[in-house]
Image: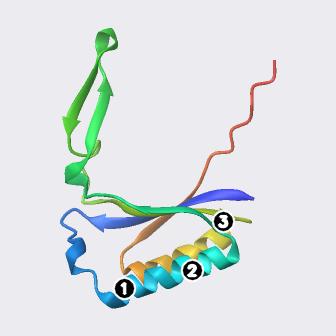
Amino acid sequence: MQQYLVAIQHPEDYDPSLESEAMIRDIGALNKEMDAAGARCFAGGLESARHAKSLRKQPGGNVSITDGPYTEAKEFIGGFWILQCADMDEALAWGRKAVVACRVPVEVRAFLKIRPNRT
């Protein structure tokens, strides 16, 4: 089975205090459904992008740390699920349910399959 990231996209000015009781119930129900299907490996919400720190390698091996996200964007990942699915179609089916439950766009991406070097 392949692992997939289902990432919730929040707008830059997203205010989690405005999440309705109905939305919280819908997300909880989706989590239970994912658990019952054996699909959910992990799920988590993230602090807003304004609380992020970005690290960049500098010449000489130093690392700089700056406030804010690495990229300039209007939407940021606000939370995510890591799912175990048979294929992209199954992951997209969960993604459709996530869009409805979370009421925001989501992105679905497969994890890279890393093959060990053969020497």
Q: CA distance from mark 2 to mark 1?
A: 14 Å
User: Which residue was labeled with disc 3?
Assistant: 88
Q: State the quadrant of the C terminus.
A: top right
Find residue 23 and name its label: 1
The answer, for residue 28, to whether it is visible in the render is: yes
Assign a secondary structure to mark 1.
helix
Find residue 56 and name its label: none
Q: Residue at x 27, y 80 (%)?
A: 19
* Vertical position of residue 28 compared to residue 13: above or below: below
Q: Residue at x 75, y 25 (%)?
A: 117
Assign a secondary structure to mark 3.
helix
Residue nearer the viewer, 26 or 106: 26
Q: Is residue 69 left or right of residue 29?
A: left
Quadrant housing residue 78:
bottom left
The three-letter code of the residue at mark 2 reads Lys
Q: State the quadrant of the N terminus.
A: bottom right
Mark 3 packing: few (<14 Cα in 10 Å), some, or many (20+)?
some
Q: Position of residue 93 (x, y in %)?
A: 61, 77
Q: Nearer the viewer, mark 1 or mark 3?
A: 1
User: Which residue was labeled with disc 2?
Assistant: 32
Which of marks 3 and 1 precedes in the sequence?
1
Q: Position of residue 20 (x, y in %)?
A: 28, 86
Which of marks 2 and 3 precedes in the sequence?
2
